[in-house]
Amino acid sequence: MSEAKFVDGLWVRKPSDKAPDYVKCGLSFEREKLIAWLYSQADDSINVDIQESKGGKWYAKLSNFVPRSHCERQDNNQQTGGYVKNEPARKEPPLDDDLNDDIPF
C-alpha cells in the first residue's frame, strides 16, 4: 500500500450538528501553502479524497485511484480495492479493403 500524500494548505472539518443536511463538510485554505502544493503536483487534474481518521478527525488525501478498463471486483483483495484485470486488451480488427464496397453512395 502506498504512503498517504496529504494536501498542504487544506483543512477539512465535520459540519456542525446544527448545520443543514446539505452541508457535508467545511474546508479551510491556507492560500500560499495550497498554491505551492498544487504547483508541486505533476498532473493537471488532481483528485482528493476526504477521509476520516480512526480518531474521528477529517483530512484531505491525494487520491491515487487509477481506473482500469475491463476490471472486475475481486472480493478477497481488500488492500488494493480488489480491482484486477478481467480480460486481455483487445487488438485492433484487421483492416479490410472491401469495406468501401458496402457504402451506398
Image (spheres, rainbow, N blue to C red):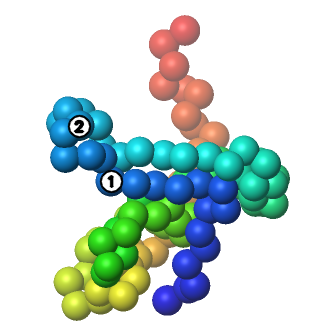
Q: In this orientation, which residue lies closer to the viewer: 69 or 32?
A: 32
Amino acid on which disc 2 is placed: Ala
Task: Check disc 1 and report the residue beneath it.
Answer: 14
Task: Check disc 2 and report the residue beneath it.
Answer: 19
Q: Residue at x 37, y 69 (%)?
A: 57
Q: How much space separates mark 2 and mark 1, taking CA atoms?
A: 10 Å
Q: What element carries label 2?
A: loop
Image: 89 above or below 28:
below
Image: 64 above or below 36:
below
Image: 30 above or below 82:
above
Question: Would residue 36 appear left or right of 88 to someone viewing this image?
Answer: right
- Where is residue 102 shown, x and y percent of the image? 48, 25
Q: Which residue is drawn at 81% across and 60% down?
A: 40
What is the count of numbered marks?
A: 2
Q: In which quarter of the image is residue 10?
A: bottom right
Q: In this orientation, which residue lies closer to the viewer: 35 or 29?
A: 29
Question: Would residue 16 appear left or right of 98 to someone viewing this image?
Answer: left
- Where is residue 23 shown, x and y percent of the image? 29, 37
Q: Residue at x 42, y 59 (%)?
A: 50
Image: 2 above or below 66:
below
Q: Which residue is drawn at 45% across and 75% down?
A: 88
- Where is residue 93 shown, x and y percent of the image? 54, 54
Amino acid on which disc 1 is placed: Lys
Q: In this orientation, which residue lies closer to the viewer: 37 or 30?
A: 30
